[in-house]
């Protein structure tokens, strides 16, 4: 379980998180929605220690994320970055098997390559892709490779940062289905941030709406359409009028 | 009175900002050096850095040294002619190349070629979240990106400087023997007899320091790059500027340490 307790974070005078409190139960898929710049990515990066909160606590299975062995902690996570964040200098299979080629989870090279090819196959890519470089792949293929890398070491918790941004609707649908299948199959706890309502409906067990640095609404995805929350209603229906100020 | 106070305040802020930058760079340098000695090690990245920083810089450093040595021979010959001292060409080329021009020219070329490329690469990795990805994959960016490049700079740049010194002297030798009528054997003898061990040691130590500065500045400004293409461009530009100035300042200090007595 991931638990945010009154997390605050500011960058200079820009107060991004203003007391974020949220619970993501183990083995469930939580999708955080909200406008650009509302702190969705910051929230995920705070869990991983990429950004340090100014105050508040983040607990994973009851343990404060700032305590304990950092490598062992990070080994429990996989993350799909918005732009893929694949390492340009490494071929695809080494990107996927990155964690398996070094550090505590190191395996023999042949075994790591085999696992990488298996994970690539799981996300719908052929073994021939393994020896290409990221720059030789389309956007959709890069997302799939990023997904393969995120699941390569069988993590307990997976984060997806805008998994469908920049993809055509069909490819976005494919990625959504893949994410859902993989999360269910691995029994992982998933946290996704997105603007894409199709993704929300495809991926989420629970939804949280982040606005002004706090959670305005959270609940099961089935309750989203009848929440009665004006912020959530405005967001999911994409209305310009409402409590969320739209800059024209 | 208010104007004076405002001027003083501005001056104070500038000095504080400069001191804080120096402090940040120094802490980064200490951390980078400490990571060289602490596991895990990344031999593949070190090998790649040795190749990029050392082997692939050889043509540019070699050509720079060759032309510098040749030009130096011409200058000393024509300048020396004003007081009948044309014969000192071998000695001055040797001392000029080994003590000063060899390391400085190599250092500046490394700053242009290596610092810029390291800064641009790491800054691009930063803006495309590859550095964040490294962290989430339990890999310390300082160990994986900075330590191998710094170590490669410390190892390869003195070697490049040594090779550049030899090529520079060879440039002077070719110009002197082919154009200026020097006897080849006498030129070589004068060069070898005149150079001292301290000249060579100072050259290699300077190379080591310049290699450290060039790679560290590339890594530091890359890691602290701003967002987008503009951020990458600014990081690259600043890294080369700072590396070049620090190399020249370090050269002055090291020359003082080795030869002021």
Image (spheres, coloured by chain):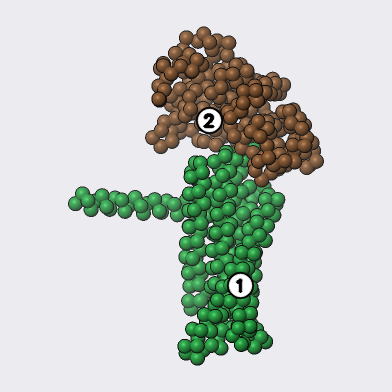
Between tags 1 and 2, which lies in front?
1
Q: Nearer the viewer, residue A205 or A131?
A: A131
Up/down of B133 relative to B75, above or below: above
Q: Secondary structure at mark 1?
A: helix
Residue at 43 percent across and 26 percent down: it is A18
Q: Furthest residue to the bottom?
A: B84
Q: Nearer the viewer, residue B39 or B224?
A: B224
What is the letter of the green chain?
B
Residue at 55 percent across and 51 percent down: it is B119
Q: Quadrant of residue A248?
A: top left
Residue B155 at x, y percent in the picture? 64, 62
Residue corresponding to mark 1:
B66
Q: Quadrant of residue A12?
A: top left
Residue corresponding to mark 2:
A41
Residue at 66 percent across and 85 percent down: it is B184
Q: Chain of mark 1?
A: B
Residue A136 at x, y percent in the picture? 68, 40
């Amino acid at each position: 379980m991931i638990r945010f307790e009154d997390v605050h974070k500011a960058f200079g005078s820009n107060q991004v998180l203003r007391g974020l409190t949220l619970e993501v139960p183990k083995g469930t898929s939580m999708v955080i929605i909200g406008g650009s710049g509302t702190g969705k990515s910051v929230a995920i990066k705070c869990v991983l220690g990429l950004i340090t909160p100014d105050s508040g606590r983040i607990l994973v299975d009851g343990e404060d994320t700032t305590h304990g062995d950092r490598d062992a902690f990070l080994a429990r996570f996989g993350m799909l970055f918005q732009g893929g964040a694949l390492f340009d200098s490494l071929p695809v299979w080494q990107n996927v098997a990155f964690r398996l080629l070094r550090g505590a989870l190191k395996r023999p090279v042949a075994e790591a390559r085999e696992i990488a090819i298996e994970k690539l196959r799981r996300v719908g890519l052929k073994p021939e892709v393994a020896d290409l470089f990221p720059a030789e792949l389309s956007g959709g293929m890069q997302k799939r490779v990023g997904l393969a890398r995120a699941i390569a070491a069988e993590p307990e918790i997976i984060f997806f940062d805008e998994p469908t941004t920049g993809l055509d609707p069909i490819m976005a649908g494919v990625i959504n289905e893949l994410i859902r299948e993989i999360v269910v199959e691995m029994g992982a706890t998933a946290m996704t941030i997105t603007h894409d309502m199709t993704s929300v409906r495809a991926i989420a067990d629970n939804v949280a709406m982040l606005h002004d640095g706090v959670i305005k609404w959270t609940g099961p995805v089935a309750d989203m359409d009848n929440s009665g929350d004006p912020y959530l209603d405005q967001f999911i229906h994409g209305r310009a009028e409402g409590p969320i100020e739209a800059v024209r | 009175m208010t104007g004076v106070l405002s001027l003083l305040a501005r001056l104070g802020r500038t000095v504080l900002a400069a001191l804080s930058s120096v402090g940040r760079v120094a802490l980064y340098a200490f951390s980078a050096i400490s990571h060289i000695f602490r596991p895990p090690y990344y031999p593949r990245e070190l090998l790649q850095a040795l190749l990029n920083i050392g082997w692939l810089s050889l043509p540019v450093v070699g050509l720079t040294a060759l032309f510098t040595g040749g030009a130096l021979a011409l200058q000393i010959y024509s300048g020396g002619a004003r007081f009948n001292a044309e014969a000192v060409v071998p000695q001055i080329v040797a001392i000029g190349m080994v003590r000063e021009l060899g390391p400085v020219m190599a250092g500046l070329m490394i700053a242009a070629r290596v610092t810029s490329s390291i800064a641009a690469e790491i800054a691009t990795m930063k803006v495309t979240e590859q550095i964040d990805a490294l962290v989430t994959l339990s890999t310390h960016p300082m160990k994986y990106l900075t330590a191998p490049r710094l170590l490669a700079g410390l190892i390869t740049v003195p070697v490049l400087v040594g090779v550049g010194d030899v090529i520079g002297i060879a440039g002077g030798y070719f110009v002197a023997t082919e154009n200026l009528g020097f006897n080849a054997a006498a030129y070589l003898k004068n060069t070898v007899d005149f150079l001292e061990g301290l000249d060579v040691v100072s050259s290699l130590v300077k190379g080591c320091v310049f290699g450290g500065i060039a790679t560290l500045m590339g890594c530091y400004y890359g890691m602290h790059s701003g967002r987008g293409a503009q951020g990458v461009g600014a990081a690259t530009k600043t890294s080369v500027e700072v590396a070049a100035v620090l190399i020249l300042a370090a050269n002055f200090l090291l020359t003082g340490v080795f030869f002021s007595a």
